[in-house]
Image: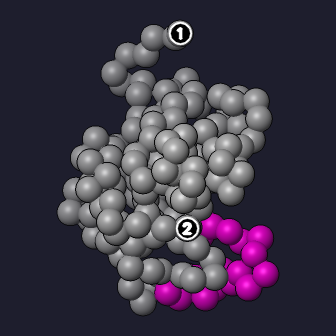
Amino acid sequence: MKEYQTGQIRNVALVSHNGAGKTTMVERLLFDTGAITRLGKVQDGTATTDFEEEEVARNSSTSTAIAPIEYAGLKVNLLDTPGYVDFVGEMNAALSVADGALILVESVAGVEVGTEIAWQATLERDLPRIIVINKMNRDNARAARAMASIREN
């Protein structure tokens, strides 16, 4: 395994409300960077970062999983966090070691309670963040409506 200097490692937390697509986004990034050769699916129980029996049964993350990828000469540790408010401690733990965060907003639902909690947690830590409007392939997806909900909140 390749060794990295501290300056070559980034920890990026994916945070949002439950069901916004964090695990699927991580799966896609793992696949697109060659870290995995088969694209798993949450609903099939084959997602790389949802491996605990409870997570597979729920089709939902219950703990933070680390998924390393290599990109632009850096090791990027993707921190796939649970979205249910019951597991907010997992999100907070991941953010405490993160260099930045991707905040996923579901394109149909827009900003939800978990999104607001994630946003506030990144603000409190003064973390760089990128908002990603996700699931744009859904029937009722509207980027403008999702952006409006982001601006309102």
Disc 1 element:
loop
Which circle marks residue 97 in the picture?
none
Neighbours of disc 1 within 10 Å: few (<14), some (14-19), many (20+): few
Q: CA distance from mark 1 to mark 2?
A: 33 Å
Horizontal side of 50 relative to 134 (left or right) equals left
Which is more N-terminal, label 2 or label 1? 1
At 28% from the left edge and 41% from the top edge, which residue is drawn? 97
Q: Which residues are magenta?
A: 133-149
Which circle marks residue 1 in the picture?
1
- On the image, the x and y values in percent for residue 75 come to 49, 27
- Comparing 41 with 125, the one in front is 41
Horizontal side of 138 relative to 100 (left or right) equals right
Horizontal side of 127 relative to 131 (left or right) equals left
Disc 2 element:
loop
- Comparing 121 with 47, the one in front is 47
- Comparing 68 with 122, the one in front is 68
Q: Can the viewer see residue 22?
A: no
Q: Which residue is mark 2?
A: 19
Q: Specify the quadrant that holds the C terminus.
A: bottom left
- On the image, the x and y values in percent for residue 27 come to 64, 44
Q: Residue furthest left?
A: 124
At 75% from the left edge and 41% from the top edge, which residue is drawn? 39
Report if residue 44 lies within the magenta region.
no
